Amino acid sequence: MEPIPPSGLYYPNKFALITLDAFEQVMGKNGLNAILNLAHLTHLIDNYPPDNLNKEFDFAYYTAVNVALEEMYGPRGGRGLALRAGRALFADALRNFGALAGVGDLAFKVLPLPAKLRIGIPAMARIFSQVSDQRTTVQELDNEILYTIHKCPVCWGRAGSDKPVCFIATGLLQEGLKWVSGGSEFRVNESRCIAMGDEVCEFVIQKTPIR
């Protein structure tokens, strides 16, 4: 694969660290090292980002790992690994984070599900706007919620894809919805993707849980 040019947009080190740790758990250290080699990120081998919120991990690095996953494991295998890493990123990094800290409180737990979604999903979006250069907006419709990423770290610099590719973001949303709702699973589909030539990456969340 070709190197992806730097974006000048950044994720906090902590989010990148947890993502890399999640991949290492899933595919082993040698597997992750092979991915980092393929992604032209050899400087990260045995040298993960520090555990802090400094915005120093370029979106291009995040995208390069995503592309390398697809190249090494195929679209289906890469998708499964990315979904798992996205879920781990939420579970390890975001569930006790600022805007979501109150989600575990009893007062929140007794709210009806529509209210939990109305409060919890924008809270998730705000975290990224506050601590990274990812800009996210949320719009509520009758039966769906649109979660839109305007500057996406998962597909930065990608073009020509015939399908959405931001599975790390999908996994993160799935796990976030499970946490916010108190254990339900929701259908999340990426309907628009910058890698396909769209202006934004848009995720359609069905309000009615699958289970």
Image: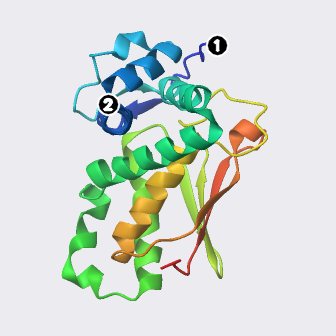
Q: Position of residue 104 (x, y in %)?
A: 23, 72
Tell me which corner region of the image, top left, top right, bottom left or bottom right, holds residue 207.
bottom right
Q: Secondary structure at mark 2?
A: helix
Who is closer to the viewer here, 89 or 30?
Answer: 30
Q: Is residue 6 left or right of residue 44?
A: right
Tell me which corner region of the image, top left, top right, bottom left or bottom right, holds residue 110.
bottom left
Who is closer to the viewer here, 102 or 84?
Answer: 84
The numbered dot on residue 13 is 2
Residue type at numbered disc 1? Glu
Residue at 65% x, 82% y: name it: 142
Label 2, residues with CA under 10 Å away: few <14, some 14-19, many ≥20 = many
Mark 1 or mark 2, whichever is nearer to me: 1
Instruction: Kindly check if marks 1 and 2 are in contact, taking CB atoms under 8 A apart as contact.
Output: no
Residue 135 visible in rendering = no
Residue at 49% x, 49% y: name it: 83
Q: Is residue 95 left or right of residue 113?
A: left
Q: Is residue 68 left or right of residue 164?
A: left
Residue 167 visible in rendering = yes
Determine which residue is flagged by label 1. 2
Q: Position of residue 62 (x, y in %)?
A: 48, 30
